[in-house]
Every structure is written in structure tokens, then in C-alpha cells.
Amino acid sequence: MALLYGLIWRLLLALVRIKRATVSWLRVRLRTWKGRFWQRTMAALLLPVPVAEFKQKKADANQSSDGDGDGKGAGSRRSRWISDGISLEKLPVHIGLVVAEEELSFTDIANMVVWCMAVGVSYVSVYDHHGIFQKNNSSLQEEIVKQQHNLLGGDDSAFNMELLRNGTDKPQHFVVSCRPIVKVLSPEDGKHSIVQAARKLCHSVEKKEWSSKDISVSVLDVLLRESKNIPDPELVVKFGAVNSTLGFLPWHIRLTEFVSLPSHKNVLYEDLFGALQHYSACHQRLGQ
């Protein structure tokens, strides 16, 4: 009798296992069938139209970035960008564009500078780890003016933009349609400026102009801010896969919000505005 019960128990266990295996197989097949069904359905419904539409949208986006000669289009873009800036709960006074890529696009950086102007940002810093933008300062200046005319139209109103190579350079004035200050920075303006400020303090102590007791963090902070003469960046948009600030103004970014984008090449206005929206929505506790 015990042997019979054992056989029946084993039979029941086998049936349960077969049931479980069958249910699992059916679930996999059902998911696969559903996935293929929806893929084929979506392909049948969407692909004939979007292939052309996506190409057209991409062309329109490129045309918008490169600009056209239509003054009406430039005016509508300008109105839209100004409206976007007003719609944000808070707008950074100073935004940094940090490029962590080997190949640089002056046109794309110039586009972003102009977009920052249009939405109402007052200070824009452009930075790359090798200092290429700073070495080619005049080329970047020409590209900014060119893209300003392409994107916002040929409005030659008497607004000035100051483009500075670093804290010791004199401003270079040229006509654009907004009043921002653009700073082109390199690693020399980061850690090197801290070293220079420290040396200045040491020389002051050596000449007995200061005593060692007078030196403090606040004194160093004043010296560094005098050399830069710009507010701390509230927002930095970093481009590239490197997870590093690459020496960008290390003294000035303790409260800065960072947003990373894959690349600065072919970047769209929507990408930059998305970073501004992220900053507008974030709540900074300021160490509390």
C-alpha cells in the first residue's frame, strides 16, 4: 500500500512539473507573438510615412540651426526663445559650456552661445581641456557673429557683446543683438589661477604687506573673484562621455548644477533648453 501511495505521489509531482513547464512555454510564446505582432503592426502603420517625415524634420532642424535669410522666420525664432526664457521659473545668470571631446565644432558652440543670448543668459563661458577655443579666439568670435545673423536675423542694433580670453584681457566689443559677456576659458584659468593667487598672497607676506594671520579662505576667494570678474556659474552643460569637470573653474563651481549631454556636435536648441528646464526645476539646498 505504501508503494502505491509513493507511485501516485511521484505521478502527481510529474504532472505539476509538466504543467509548470507548459505554462512557462506558453508565456514565452505569447510574449514573443505579441512583440512580433506589435512590431509588424507598428511597422505597417508608421513606417511608410515617418521615413519621409523624419528626414524632413531633420532637414528642418538643420535649416533652423544653420539659419535662413527669412527675416520673418528669424523674428519668430527670437520671439519663441525669449518666451522660453521667460517661462522658466529661474534662469542661470552664468552658464558654462564644457566640451570634453577631442574634435571641436565652432559652429555648434556658436549656436549655443546665441541661444543662451536669446533666452536671456547674461554670461556664457566656453571651455575645453586643451584650450583650443581660447587659442582660436578670433575664429570663435567670427562664428558667433555669423550664427547670430543666421539665427536671429541681420539686426545691427547697437548692442554689444564682450568676448574675453581670460581675466586679464581687455574686452573685445563687436555688434550683436544681445548684451551678454562670453568668456573663453582654458585650464590656465582654473587651477593655475588658484596657484597665482596663492603666490600673490605669499609675496605680500614676504614684503610684509600682509601678515600670515591675515590670510584666510575669504581673502583668497576675493582675489580669485577679482581675477575672473564674473559671477559663479549656476549651470554647466558638459558634452562628452568623460565624467569629469576637466579643471573648469574649480573654485567657482561648489554650488553649480551639472547637466551632461552626449556630444556638442549637431546639438539642437531643444537639448540646451532641456538643460535649462532641468536647472529651473532643481531645488538647491545650498549646504542645508
Image (cartoon, rainbow, N blue to C red):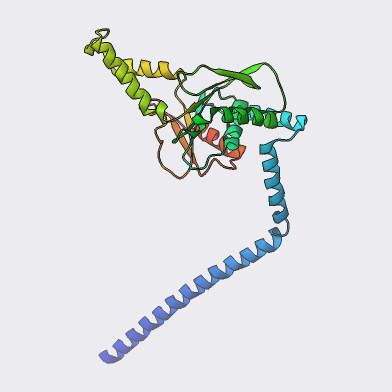
Position of the N terminus by quadrant: bottom left
Q: Give whichever of 198, 213 is nearer the camera.
A: 198
Q: Position of residue 81 (x, y in %)?
A: 65, 30
Is residue 1 among the parts visible in the rendering?
A: no
Q: Foreground residue, 162 or 8? A: 162
Please give the name of the residue rendered at 30% of the width and 20% of the height, measured from the top-left corner: 198
Q: Going by the image, does 58 lie left or right of 13?
A: right
193 is higher (above) or lower (below) than 42: above
Q: Work out whether residue 120 or residue 244 is closer to the camera in this orientation and state it.
A: 244
For image coordinates 48% across by 30% down, the residue present is 235
Quadrant hosting residue 246: top left
Asked if one can make out residue 12 in the rendered structure from this viewpoint, the answer is yes
157 versus 281 height, above or below: above
Residue at 57% of width from left, 65% of height from top? 35
- Of residues 220 and 144, the one nearer the viewer is 144
Residue 288 % position (x, y): 35, 27
Give the x, y percent position of residue 239: 49, 40
> What is the quadrant of residue 47 in the picture?
bottom right
> Residue 113 in the image: x percent, y percent?
58, 30
Number of numbered discs on residues: 0
Q: Left or right of 83: which side holds 284? A: left
Q: Quadrant of residue 156?
A: top right
